[in-house]
Image (cartoon, helix red, strand yellow):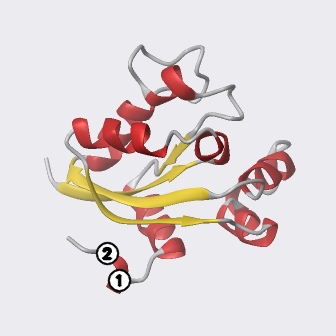
Amino acid sequence: MAVERTLSIIKPDATKRNLTGKIVAKFEEAGLRVVASKRIHLTAAQAGAFYAEHKERGFYGELVAYMASEPVVVQVLEGEGAILKNREVMGATDPAAAAAGTIRKEFALSKGENSVHGSDSEAAAAREIAFFFSGLELVG
């Protein structure tokens, strides 16, 4: 399996509850390495641009408002099969359906406040990483 990079976002519900360290530890325990990280507070315009692919969906406005409500931690994770590994560690979007030991099972408040985001493909990872980080910020 190839070494990949993927974007991870620790969402407002988790940063508000000071879960950043616990969530990062789960990624690291799974063999992923943080190669870039920063805490930011997205504006509604920035959140809207990031989630533009969902603009026509009913949940878009609520998602944008939520992502701009509190600071988030954006990070780039690296490792063997990082995209799939990140998604496994996060668990299912709906915490009620997430496997035991996953981030969403342990920390998510609801399907909407599900504590983390992760890229779902190589193309998404490249686009999402470039949205938040310059090449100079990625330290391998």
* Type of amino acid at the residue the image marks with label 2: Leu
Query: In front here: 38 or 135?
Result: 38
Query: In front here: 53 or 3?
Result: 3
Query: In front here: 5 or 123?
Result: 5
| Marker disc for residue 135 | 1
Query: Circle 1 sits in a helix, a strand or a loop, which is it?
Result: helix
| Residue in the image at 71% along x and 71% along y | 46
Q: Is residue 94 above or below residue 58?
A: above
* x, y percent for residue 22: 41, 37
Q: Is residue 9 above or below residue 14?
A: below
The residue carrying pointer 2 sits among few (fewer than 14), some (14 to 19) or many (20 or more) residues within 10 Å by Cα, namely: some
* x, y percent for residue 135: 35, 83
Locate residue 134: give its quadrant.
bottom left
Q: Is residue 138 above or below residue 62?
A: below
| Residue in the image at 46% along x and 27% along y | 91
The answer to the question of whether label 2 and label 1 lie on touching residues, with beta carbons closer than 8 A, is: yes
* Type of amino acid at the residue the image marks with label 1: Gly
25 lies left or right of 3? right
Q: Which residue in the protein does label 2 denote? A: 138
The residue carrying pointer 1 sits among few (fewer than 14), some (14 to 19) or many (20 or more) residues within 10 Å by Cα, namely: few
| Marker disc for residue 6 | none
